[in-house]
Image (cartoon, helix red, strand yellow):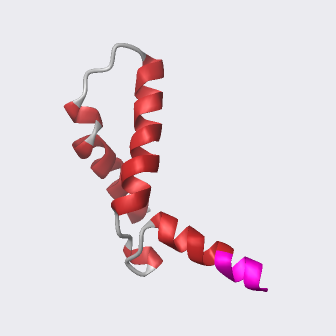
Amino acid sequence: MPGRKSFNATLKNERVHRMVYPTREKVIKDVASWIELTYNHTRLHSALGYRTPNEAEHELNSRKQAA
């Protein structure tokens, strides 16, 4: 799956390899925060028509409410 490999590489290069985590719990919290606050808000995805995941989700929810 190309998308998953790209995501994992981005996560490792932009966050995990730049940090030192004292516990597993800190890793989990930091990665979840990075995904929600950075990746989902700023990264454009070709599979989503070069929109962010949040933009695509917002559009989907708007369509569901209009139906």
**Residue 22, position as x, y percentages in the image:** 34, 13
Res 18 → quadrant:
top left
Tell me: residue 35, above or below residue 64.
Answer: above
Residue drawn at x 41%, y 48% as measured from the top left: 37
Magenta region: 62-67
**Residue 21, position as x, y percentages in the image:** 32, 20
Residue drawn at x 47%, y 30% as measured from the top left: 29
Q: Residue furthest top?
A: 22
Tell me: residue 47, above or below residue 1.
Answer: below
Quarter holding the C terminus? Answer: bottom right
Quarter holding the N terminus? Answer: bottom left
**Residue 15, position as x, y percentages in the image:** 28, 39
Residue drawn at x 50%, y 64% as measured from the top left: 54
Res 19 → quadrant:
top left
**Residue 44, position as x, y percentages in the image:** 35, 69
Q: How many marks?
A: 0
Residue 66 within the magenta-colored segment of the rendering = yes
Residue drawn at x 46%, y 48% as measured from the top left: 36
- From the viewer's perspective, is 18 left or right of 60? left
Res 33 → quadrant:
top left
